[in-house]
Image: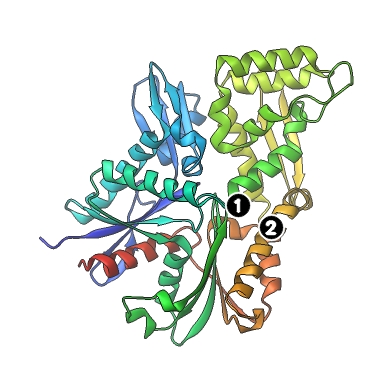
Amino acid sequence: MTPISGGIDFGTSNSTVGIYRDGRARLVALEGPQVTMPSAVFYNFEDNGTYFGRRAIADYSDHVEGRLLRALKSVLGSSLAHEKTRIKARSIAFTDIIGSFIFYLKDRLETEAGQAVENVVMGRPVHFVDEDEAADREAQDQLENAARAQGFRHIAFQFEPIAAALDYEQQVTGEELALIIDIGGGTSDISIVRVSPERAKAEDRRDDILASTGVHIGGTDFDKLLSVSHVMPEFGYKTPTRDGKRNLPAGYFFDLATWQRINMLYTPKAMSDLRQMRQEAAQPELVERMIDVVGHRQGHALAGRVERAKIDLTDMAETMMDISLTDERLHLPVTRAGLDEAIAHTVERVLKVITNSVADAGLRPEQITTLFLTGGSTAIPLLKQSILALFPNARPVEGDRFGSVGLGLALDAKRKFGTA
């Protein structure tokens, strides 16, 4: 039996799996016919099952007793990676939870392949951790160890924007100087690559990669900024203490607004601190709202409503965030202008990384012939329009925002492992 390899794009918000068969790369169905799957894990306390993707989110949304975890990729290389979280009577390491998610993806890959798969190319951001090479190496090692523990024997890595470039190259008819911008849930990755039908045949493409860099900014950061600016003030953020001498401590508000830190609030100490904060607050009824969300473990539901508002504002000028609490329902309007204001500084940071990457490659913006955008966050209007404005002479191409990397990883697996 001819060995088959695959590519896994384990993303902060969504994941895909690619396979190369019958002369082409394609994405593997992960949930029914769906080839894209939310990177979510839910431990169901009622039936003791572990569920992934849409099923995980559905159980949580239906108020099934359990624990939801999302944005797990963001813990790699951080101090959280070494910590454990309480799942009923067990304490489970975050890296083991990541491993269980990869096992699910591997099972879907092997079902599609009809055989065991031991060879895989894993996607990775250019930087898991900004400006910390040791932590960045540790993050890749943690991901590799998680994959190896699930039965993969031969594991290679490819930068996610390079994988997107390999996918894009399948459609080019001549030589292009392509700027690949992949902005997903957790990172913004940028590569400048020479692509052509002839270059696609080469096994070693290092000379075609003129620049590759990135920054740890993505969709979950924009969610956080929107939450901090529009939601957290309704829970007491930036409100004063009763004596008027200071504002309430900000830490727990930022935790509630940050996908990967939400579960850190579900501890007796955090609840005790929040109750103390309520006693000190000039507006205790606002902090009571936060206690309500944390006490009912609805932090991810709140973050999901913020994310939904951000997505709605891709095509709408205004939307409404409806937040259900025990004794009240909040209706918080948010406009695209409000989103733009919340994320403007962070967008500027992404733009600076892009312009620096072009300069570091010894190029001028007008020399870029193709601008290839992939990753879900490239749909954010302010971000997309700002990027396009930097390269007015380049031909903009929108790839499969959620699938380009997985397809490119499958192509790279064919190149690296020589499978059918």
Q: Is residue 320 above or below residue 67?
A: below
Whether pointer 1 and pointer 2 mark residues with C-beta atoms closer than 8 Å, the reply is yes
State the mark number for residue 349: 2
Q: Amino acid at mark 2?
A: Arg
Q: How many marks?
A: 2
Q: Is residue 305 left or right of residue 171?
A: right
| Whether residue 37 is visible | no
Q: Residue at x 27, y 45 (%)?
A: 148
Q: Residue at x 22, y 51 (%)?
A: 153
Q: Amino acid at mark 1?
A: Ile
Q: Is residue 92 left or right of residue 370?
A: left
Mark 2 burial class by Cα count in 10 Å: few <14, some 14-19, many 20+: few
Front position in the image: 126 or 106: 126
Q: Is residue 210 above or below residue 40?
A: below
Q: What is the quadrant of the C terminus in the image?
A: bottom left
Give residue 53's position: percent from left, percent from top.
42, 41
State the mark number for residue 217: 1
